[in-house]
């Protein structure tokens, strides 16, 4: 079972700790939760969601607060420890150094990071960002505020650059691309209120019990009102079978509430075939809602033709789910009146993710499950303000209306070329085409595939400026060619000004001013840094950047230029948090050219894996090629590891591979045995086998450690890496040809550390 009493124990432990009072204060601070995009907290109170339902704060929220409440990095730390030492630290060790509380610089060739004055910081930054605009870039991570995001893109675009890479490029970009193509809107079509009216939910490629715990409350409630939950995931996540939530009576917490009505375990990357199978059953049983398709969609005939023309064997061979199981799933969907289709990284981090989301949308449309209360499409967003970044224009796919509004504001025409997304940025840097990079949070190095390339690429950039709250792997491995600056910033609940954030459910939260617990700290706010740099780069006309240090003026610009955000202009007076207009669809009328949904034909994926020989493994070596899914453990936030193990999956530490029992037995292996794992970019040795309920031929490892293994293929329309279907070979002894293998040079042996 997921959740349950261990959660309560965690709360009690944290609150009874010496830091308990501090944590409690921050928890009660009127600001959105730092952790995920479900968006609990804000003006309505710490434990409230947007519908003012109580008990909505989860342990992950506490974990994130506790991590930001660490004491500052010791004043002499960087003088004491040389770079080579910092580079031996693990993700968790980096985080445990504490909060960054004074700015430092690493000058190439030196042995240590050293403190730096604000004057010199701005001099270096100003010089760096005066390079030709196509050679400067930013990367951002969705924890910062809407105001910081808006200022970032305005400053970079005003320079004449569109190089606004963002963590969403590695995350939900495929959802934005697909939904915009079909519906003319890139975010969830469903509000929390509407979700609560559903009688069916199809949850695809999400580990919500760990990553969006309060979504679980909605699944429990749905079950209680007799609804249906279909889960699609190659791994049976325990919390998706049964989950104990503190928001429900004690019996539920202790014994757990049932979650899934049906659990399907397709091959990683094959969800599209499964959804086409569902469409085929709908067609065979004449359950397709033709009236709906005729009135509210275009191109439906081609989609139906494709389904007709595809035979059953083709579909079931790809996803390895039987026709009978697909029929059961379809019957369940058909019996519901209002179904929400929700998905996360299991869907988006695939080479064909945009097509897969098209197939999910097609299924929803064929069953009339879009554009009404209780039904629709819901990408489950990641970082707490990642969606806000997209809305604020931090994207390489800027909407025409926003571009025109920004052009009017700046009195200059903006570049039309799309700019670098996160992957393109690394590729461009790798070929020496980037001179300056500003990272507003995040960990560009460790979030990318092929860490060897990421390190090399960042090393070709002259100047990198990291704005961050805590040290991470990227600060010590993602070093620039000349100057690497780490600028300490306030966390959300410490900012000296008000900010706003946007949840995955399109709800805008207002975050109050706060204070930091750090003593003698020399921090800046993101808004202060960006406005000061922009002032130095652009002067004070037509935009008075320094005035924008007062964030209510930024909100006025947002209200003027960002569609749906009009209400933010008055939020300082009204304190009224709001749902962005034009995002939630209770009628099947969409902002497309014809007002109808644009259905898309969905090519089937070819899911072959390389042979062992192609990985350089000899025939007689016990080995297996698997589709490796890389993702989060229960106790980490993205590249930041909070705890070594994952108790819900029975994984004791970071250097483990979760495998299917038969796959293990057939190679003559046993659980806890150590093996090697090799991908197309690197190898990890001494990896412990853990048996899990994952389907045959698939396996799971944790990122960022696993990012050393793969180059990762990229979904072409969104630029998102296929982190969830990484071809690797698992083997138990060196193959004879091993030493000749170029990959041997990237061998990594940290696996032995546990
Ligand atoms: N506590 C915590 N919360 C977080 C985060 C965190 O790191 N920690 N990160 C935040 C961010 S940025 C994000 S993007 C989200 C991530 O939230 P999730 O998307 O839930 O996270 P992942 O760990 O990437 O796991 C995705 C799930 O996809 C499944 N999967 C893998 N391949 C496939 C496939 O081919 N098909 C299907 N159907 N399923 C598949 C995996 O088994 C896993 O259960 O969480 C956010 N919230
Ligand atoms: N193999 C594999 N790789 C993946 C994924 C996967 O599932 N598998 N998932 C991908 C996904 S979905 C994502 S979103 C990316 C995540 O990539 P990123 O968003 O780039 O990385 P994070 O680990 O979330 O960044 C953490 C750092 O953010 C900084 N930080 C925290 N709060 C603040 C703040 O308020 N302001 C500022 N300025 N800094 C702050 C801290 O210094 C912290 O160390 O990773 C991607 N990479
Ligand atoms: S579900 Fe997400 S937003 Fe809500 S409290 Fe938990 S981590 Fe925070
Ligand atoms: Mo993400």
Image: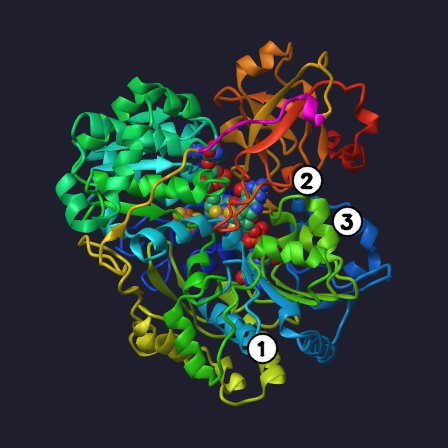
| Circle number at residue 527 | none
- Res. 171 visible in picture: yes
| Crowd rating for badge 3 (residues with CA inside 10 Å; few <14, some 14–19, many 20+) | some
State how far apart marks 1 and 3 are (Cα).
34 Å
421 to 330, vertically: above or below:
below
Give the image location of residue 584, x and y in percent: 26, 56
Q: Is residue 748 left or right of residue 289?
A: right
Q: Please, what secondary structure does the residue beneath circle 3 have?
A: loop
| Crowd rating for badge 1 (residues with CA inside 10 Å; few <14, some 14–19, many 20+) | many
Tally the numbered discs. Answer: 3
Residue at image x 59%, y 15%? 664
Image quarter where the C terminus lies is top right
Q: Earlier in the sequence, mark 3 or mark 2?
A: 3
302 or 84, nearer to the observer:
302
The residue at which mark 2 appears reads as: 708
Magenta range: 605-615
Give the image location of residue 717, x and y in percent: 48, 50
Residue at image x 40%, y 66%? 399
The residue at which mark 1 appears reads as: 159
Q: Please, what secondary structure does the residue beneath circle 1 have?
A: helix
Q: Please, what secondary structure does the residue beneath circle 2 have?
A: helix
Residue 611 is one of the magenta-drawn residues:
yes
State how far apart marks 1 and 2 are (Cα).
35 Å
């Amino acid at each position: 079972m997921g959740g349950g009493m261990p959660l309560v124990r965690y709360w009690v432990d944290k609150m009874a700790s010496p830091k308990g009072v501090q944590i409690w204060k921050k928890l009660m601070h009127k600001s959105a939760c730092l952790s995920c995009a479900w968006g609990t907290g804000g003006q309505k109170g710490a434990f409230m969601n947007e519908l003012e339902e109580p008990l909505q704060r989860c342990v992950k929220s506490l974990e994130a607060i506790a991590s930001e409440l660490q004491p500052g990095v010791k004043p002499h730390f960087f003088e004491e420890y040389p770079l080579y030492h910092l580079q031996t630290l693990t993700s968790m060790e980096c985080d445990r150094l504490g909060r960054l509380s004074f700015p430092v610089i690493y000058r190439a060739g030196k042995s240590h990071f050293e403190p730096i004055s604000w004057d010199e910081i701005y001099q270096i930054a100003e010089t760096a960002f005066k390079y030709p605009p196509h050679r400067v870039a930013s990367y951002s991570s969705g924890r910062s505020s809407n105001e910081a995001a808006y200022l970032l893109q305005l400053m970079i675009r005003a320079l004449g650059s569109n190089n606004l890479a963002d963590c969403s490029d590695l995350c939900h970009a495929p959802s934005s691309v697909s939904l915009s193509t079909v519906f003319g809107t890139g975010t969830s079509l469903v509000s929390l209120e509407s979700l609560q009216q559903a009688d069916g939910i199809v949850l695809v490629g999400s580990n919500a019990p760990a990553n969006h715990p309060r979504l679980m409350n909605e699944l429990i409630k749905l079950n209680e009102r007799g609804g249906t939950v279909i889960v699609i995931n190659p791994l049976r996540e325990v919390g998706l079978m049964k989950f104990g939530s503190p928001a429900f009576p004690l019996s539920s917490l202790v014994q757990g509430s049932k979650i899934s009505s049906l659990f399907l375990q397709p091959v990683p990357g094959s969800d599209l075939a499964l959804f086409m199978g569902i469409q085929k059953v709908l067609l065979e049983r004449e359950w397709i809602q033709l009236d709906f398709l005729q009135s509210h969609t275009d191109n439906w005939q081609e989609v139906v033709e494709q389904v007709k023309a595809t035979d059953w064997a083709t579909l079931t061979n790809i996803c390895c789910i039987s026709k009978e199981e697909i029929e059961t799933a379809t019957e369940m969907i058909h019996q519901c009146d209002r179904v929400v289709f929700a998905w996360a990284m299991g869907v988006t981090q695939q080479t064909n993710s945009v097509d897969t989301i098209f197939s999910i949308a097609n299924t929803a449309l064929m069953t009339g499950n879009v554009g009404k209360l209780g039904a629709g499409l819901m990408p489950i967003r990641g970082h707490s303000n990642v969606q806000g970044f997209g809305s604020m224009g931090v994207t390489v796919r800027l909407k025409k209306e926003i571009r025109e509004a920004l052009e009017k504001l700046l009195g200059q025409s903006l570049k039309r070329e799309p700019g670098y997304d996160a992957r393109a940025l690394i590729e461009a840097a790798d070929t020496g085409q980037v001179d300056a990079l500003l990272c507003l949070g995040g960990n560009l190095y460790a979030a990318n595939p092929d860490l060897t390339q990421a390190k090399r690429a960042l090393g070709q950039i002259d100047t990198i400026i990291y704005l961050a709250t805590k040290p991470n792997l990227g600060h010590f491995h993602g070093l620039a060619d000349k100057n690497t600056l780490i600028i300490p910033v306030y966390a959300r609940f410490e900012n000296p000004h008000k900010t706003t954030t946007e949840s995955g459910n399109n709800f805008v939260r207002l975050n109050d001013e706060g204070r930091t617990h750090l003593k003698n700290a020399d921090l800046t706010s993101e808004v202060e840094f960006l406005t000061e740099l922009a002032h130095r780069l652009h002067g004070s006309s037509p935009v008075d950047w320094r005035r924008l240090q007062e964030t209510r003026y930024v909100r006025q610009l947002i209200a003027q230029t960002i569609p749906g955000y009009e209400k933010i202009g008055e939020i300082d007076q009204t304190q009224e948090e709001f749902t962005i207009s034009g995002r939630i669809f209770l009628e099947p009328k969409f902002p497309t050219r014809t007002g109808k949904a644009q259905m898309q034909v969905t090519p089937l994926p070819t899911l072959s894996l390389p042979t062992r020989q192609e990985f350089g493994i000899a025939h007689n070596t016990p080995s297996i090629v698997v589709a490796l899914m890389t993702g989060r453990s229960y106790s980490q936030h993205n590249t930041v590891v909070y705890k070594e193990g994952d108790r819900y999956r029975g994984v004791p530490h970071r250097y483990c591979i979760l495998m299917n029992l038969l796959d293990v037995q057939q190679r003559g292996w046993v659980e806890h045995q150590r093996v090697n794992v090799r991908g197309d970019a690197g190898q990890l040795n001494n990896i412990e086998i853990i048996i899990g309920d994952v389907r045959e031929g698939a396996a799971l490892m944790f990122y960022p450690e696993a990012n050393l293994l793969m180059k990762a293929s990229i979904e072409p329309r969104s630029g998102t890496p296929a982190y969830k279907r990484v071809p690797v070979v698992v083997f138990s002894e060196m193959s004879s040809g091993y030493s000749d293998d170029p990959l041997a040079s990237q061998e990594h042996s940290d696996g032995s550390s546990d």
